[in-house]
């Protein structure tokens, strides 16, 4: 055999040409030659083995087998198949990875493709596909492109899609030394992490390390993240680092540190002691951002810490000097807005002065002159100047300012009412509504402007103007204001009619000059908006008419005329039916000199009441009034009563149980007790105005006075004897003992006549307690301990309202310790009328078996002046008599 490798190779090739298999082997050899350099010196082991196999083994050409193939060719074929499969798998993996990288979009391309999606489904498809690529990239841990993938994920998060799987990637990027990674990592932490997730605590050490570095950009990123999502635990851990940065030479870092300190104080008010010393130095800063942030920080400290409030009252002169400089000389032009020098800083300083001057005479005196300068030198032609002026007005009204300064503030609000901007007018109306109680005469000067605002097309403006107009009503202007309000009631939107009608009725009840004017006002309200008045309007008008005996004829004529024109206003129909039934004889006489002569026949009156009964608009209560009126007319009007009897017989089978019962009873009066009908249906006696509590007190005091005049007692007051007698009506106590017989005296004659045992002397009354007061709403507690049950305490909660607007949706809830038993009775209503209207009451029954000291926790929720209010407070100063 030739030893030349080349000739050997050629002979091997020639030997393979005898059959088809050697030909295939030769082709495979050519392919392998193209792929692998067989003569390369640096070959991997599998390549070297493949070469030996192709050459027929270690000894040269292999021996032929039965099929005419060499042993080396079999080894080469086997090795070639295995190697090809391996390389093909690797190439497919590389190709798949390359295709994935190629299909992943850049941020700009992703935004463009999402915006180009025509349907929501296409947008979701694009986002789901890209989120899969982002997940794969996070899983592979590519350090060079992680920040790009996270940036795309943050954009997806901003669109509202889930991006929680990027939270841990944010932590990795924050810990990275590269600034590009930190920037995106901190941004992701601010967007994807919050206090509700425990993962946010893992970045505390990274933030602490970055705050300790000297790189301003990195410190700024860490401070922004801490101020945006720092929890209470993070604030406590990182407060010392932030305090150090407050005095750093870099203005950029100091500004960020001040804003972070504001967030920390809001989260953890106990950290206020840490930031008190740097604030005094930062007030001398000339940098706009640092000074604005410092004033904000001091404001937060003063609102949350009484010690800080006392500490910073020393810097009031410095704040006054800073604000005077801004107003008189101005600052840099870049911070001026519409010609107003740095309005944001001015507003913030004014807010701080308002807090520092509240209930402090010296501080208020220091800032009075400055507030006058700001109020007179600020330009009102721009919105920025109006903002500064409004804050000035709030400061003047909240501190102990001079009377002339308060008048100036009200005049500024009056100028706001003439502004074309609706927002400014709304702010002025709201502020004047708060001032009407304390500066009523000053606000009265702007009454015509306020009334003009009633006809604003904006519903919120109109409602505020209505509330302020009702608050401005007094005894001197009640006629003019009521006329204006009645004119507004005729054309106001439906959602304002109830408030307007109730306000007019309350104002008329409180400031009515005459009873006739009062009746005319109520009748006009009922005629215009009867369906919108409160439920007690009917009872109040009936009581008013019944008490004005000289106006009975006038009232029944007016009501009959109004009822003949319109029977749709149900409160008006009810009052008219009552008056016709009560004073129908005066209606037929036609002798009223105060109205036009009106000739009315009996049949006309009966027909009108029957029309009310048959009307589909009549409520069951209205039909009850009409039935009773018909029955009363049977004794007021002379003649045949067959028509009335027929009506009663018809309603004796009415489906409404109340009407049926009433008609059956009236039929019984006609058939069985006709001789008693005139006495039963006689005119109602005059009703004295006043609540039941007032009537009870007057009755009791009258009886006590009579008894004391008849027989004065030397040892016990006659009032206590009367109370003893009243207590005996409920039965004597189980432990009551009969006292020894005493000599009869005039004082105890009443007791001996009844032959009843004397009850023990009642305890002294428990004093009332005021527990809440805000914007005219007061809450008072009155206490009663029944003598027969010493462990029971009855507490009456009384809510009164002296402000200009009704308190609606009022709910009072109470809680007591576990050793007590509490039962809340239903309240008398959920509305506390304005301007000292009828109070709202609620009864609490508390059982104290252990006679432990009583503690009471109350929660009040209500709507006042268009705002929802919730107050929770604890009453610990209850009188000792309530539990001992």
Image (cartoon, rainbow, N blue to C red):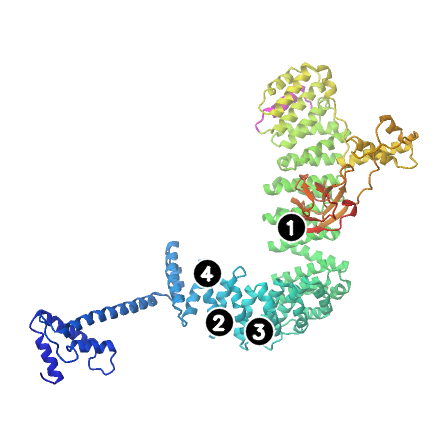
Q: Which residue is outermost to the bottom? A: 4
Front: mark 3 or 4: 4
Query: What residue sits right under mark 1 in the picture?
Result: 870
Front-most of 355 and 273? 273
User: Do the numbered discs 3 and 2 sit on residues whose CB atoms are within 8 Å?
Assistant: no
Of pointers 3 and 2, the one earlier in the residue sequence: 2
Residue matched to label 2? 175
N-term mark: 2 or 4: 4
Displayed quadrant of residue 133: bottom left
Which residue, given by chain and number where applicable, does mark 3 sit on?
Answer: 253
Residue labelled with disc 4: 164
Relative placement, left or right, of 790 versus 536 is: right
Which image quadrant for residue 666?
A: top right
Q: CA distance from mark 1 to mark 4?
A: 36 Å
Magenta stretch: includes residue 642: no
* Residues at marks 1 and 2, CA–CA distance in whole angstroms: 45 Å
How would you rate the neighbour count of disc 2 (Cα within 10 Å): few for under 14, some for 14-19, many for 20 or more?
some
**Secondary structure under badge 3?**
helix
> For the magenta stretch, what is the residue range?
598-616
The label nearer to you, 1 versus 4, is 4
Contact, CB < 8 Å: mark 3 with mark 4? Answer: no
Q: Give how far across and how far down residue 647 sits, in percent.
A: 62, 19
The answer to whether residue 474 shows anywhere in this view is no
Characterize the local packing of mark 4: few (<14), some (14-19) or many (20 or more) Cα atoms within 10 angstroms. Answer: few
How far from the left and from the top, in percent, is residue 803?
71, 47
Helix, strand or loop under label 1: strand
| Mark 1 or mark 2: whose residue is earlier in sequence | 2
Camera-side residue of 592 and 298: 298
């Amino acid at each position: 055999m030739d030893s030349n490798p080349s000739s050997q190779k050629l002979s091997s090739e020639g030997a393979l040409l005898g059959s088809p298999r050697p030909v295939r082997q030769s082709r495979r050899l050519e392919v392998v030659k193209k792929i692998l350099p067989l003569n390369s010196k640096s070959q991997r082991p599998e390549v070297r083995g493949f070469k030996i196999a192709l050459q027929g083994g270690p000894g040269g050409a292999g021996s032929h087998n039965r099929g005419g193939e060499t042993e080396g060719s079999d080894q080469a074929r086997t090795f070639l198949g295995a190697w090809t499969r391996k390389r093909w798998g690797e190439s497919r993996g590389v190709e798949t990875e390359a295709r994935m990288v190629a299909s992943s979009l850049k941020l700009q391309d992703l935004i463009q493709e999402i915006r180009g999606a025509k349907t929501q489904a296409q947008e979701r498809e694009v986002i789901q596909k890209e989120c899969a690529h982002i997940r794969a990239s996070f899983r592979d841990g590519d350090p060079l492109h992680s920040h790009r993938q996270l940036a795309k994920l943050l954009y997806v998060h901003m669109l509202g899609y889930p991006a929680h799987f990027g939270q841990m990637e944010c932590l990795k990027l924050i810990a990275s030394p590269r600034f590009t990674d930190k920037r995106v990592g901190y941004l992701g932490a601010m967007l994807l992490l919050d206090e509700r997730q425990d993962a946010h605590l893992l970045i505390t050490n990274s933030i602490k390390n970055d705050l300790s570095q000297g790189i301003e950009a990195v410190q700024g990123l860490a401070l922004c993240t801490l101020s945006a999502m720092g929890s209470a635990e993070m604030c406590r851990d990182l407060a010392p680092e932030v305090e150090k940065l407050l005095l750093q030479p870099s203005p950029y870092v100091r500004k960020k540190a001040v804003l972070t300190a504001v967030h920390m104080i809001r989260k953890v008010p106990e950290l206020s002691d840490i930031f008190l010393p740097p604030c005094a130095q930062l007030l001398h800063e000339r940098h706009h951002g640092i000074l604005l942030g410092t004033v904000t920080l001091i404001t937060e400290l003063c609102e949350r810490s009484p010690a800080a409030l006392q500490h910073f009252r020393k810097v009031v002169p410095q704040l006054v000097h800073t604000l005077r400089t801004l107003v008189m000389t101005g600052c840099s032009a870049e911070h001026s807005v519409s010609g107003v020098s740095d309005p944001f800083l001015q507003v913030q300083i004014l807010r701080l002065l308002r807090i520092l001057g509240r209930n402090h005479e010296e501080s208020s005196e220091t800032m009075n002159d400055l507030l006058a300068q700001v109020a007179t030198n600020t330009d009102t032609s721009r919105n920025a100047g109006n903002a500064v002026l409004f804050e000035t007005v709030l400061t003047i009204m909240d501190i102990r300012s001079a009377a002339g300064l308060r008048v100036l503030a009200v005049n500024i609000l009056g100028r706001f009412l003439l502004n074309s901007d609706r927002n400014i007018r709304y702010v002025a109306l709201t502020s004047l509504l708060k001032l009407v109680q304390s500066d009523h005469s000053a606000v009265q000067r702007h009454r015509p402007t306020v009334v003009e605002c009633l006809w604003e097309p904006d519903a919120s403006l109109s409602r505020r103007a209505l509330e302020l107009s009702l608050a401005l009503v007094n005894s001197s202007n009640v006629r003019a204001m009521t006329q204006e309000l009645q004119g507004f009631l005729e054309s106001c939107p439906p959602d304002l009619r109830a408030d307007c009608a109730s306000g007019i009725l309350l104002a008329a009840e409180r400031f009515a000059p005459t009873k006739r004017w009062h009746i005319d006002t109520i009748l006009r309200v009922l005629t215009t908006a009867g369906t919108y008045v409160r439920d007690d309007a009917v009872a109040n008008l009936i009581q008013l008419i019944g008490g004005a005996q000289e106006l009975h004829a006038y009232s029944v004529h007016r009501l009959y005329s109004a009822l003949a024109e319109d029977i749709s206003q149900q409160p008006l129909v009810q009052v008219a039916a009552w008056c016709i039934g009560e004073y129908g004889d005066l209606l037929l006489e036609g002798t009223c000199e105060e109205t036009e002569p009106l000739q009315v026949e009996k049949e006309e009156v009966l027909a009108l009441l029957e029309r009310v009964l048959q009307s589909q608009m009549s409520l069951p209560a209205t039909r009850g009034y009409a039935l009773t009126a018909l029955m009363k007319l049977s004794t007021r009007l002379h003649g045949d009563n067959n028509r009335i009897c027929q009506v009663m017989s018809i309603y004796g089978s009415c489906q409404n149980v109340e009407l049926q019962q009433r008609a059956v009873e009236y039929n019984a009066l006609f058939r069985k007790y006709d001789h008693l009908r005139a006495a039963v249906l006689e005119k109602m006696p005059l009703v004295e105005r006043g609540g039941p509590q007032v009537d009870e007190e007057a009755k009791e005091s009258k009886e006590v006075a009579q008894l004391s005049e008849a027989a004065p007692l030397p040892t016990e007051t006659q009032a206590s004897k009367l109370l003893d007698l009243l207590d005996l009506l409920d039965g004597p106590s189980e432990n009551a003992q009969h006292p020894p017989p005493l000599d009869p005296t005039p004082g105890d004659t009443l007791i001996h006549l009844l032959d009843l045992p004397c009850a023990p002397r009642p305890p002294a009354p428990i004093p009332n307690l005021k527990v809440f007061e805000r914007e005219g709403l007061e809450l008072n507690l009155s206490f009663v301990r029944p003598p027969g049950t010493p462990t029971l305490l009855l507490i009456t909660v009384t809510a009164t309202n002296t402000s200009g607007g009704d308190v609606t949706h009022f709910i009072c809830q109470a809680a007591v310790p576990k050793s007590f038993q509490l039962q809340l009775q239903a309240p008398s209503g959920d509305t506390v009328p304005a301007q000292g209207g009828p109070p709202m009451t609620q009864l609490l029954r508390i059982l104290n078996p252990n006679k432990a000291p009583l503690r009471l926790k109350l929660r009040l929720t209500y709507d006042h002046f268009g705002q929802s209010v919730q107050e929770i407070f604890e009453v610990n100063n209850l009188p000792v008599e309530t539990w001992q």
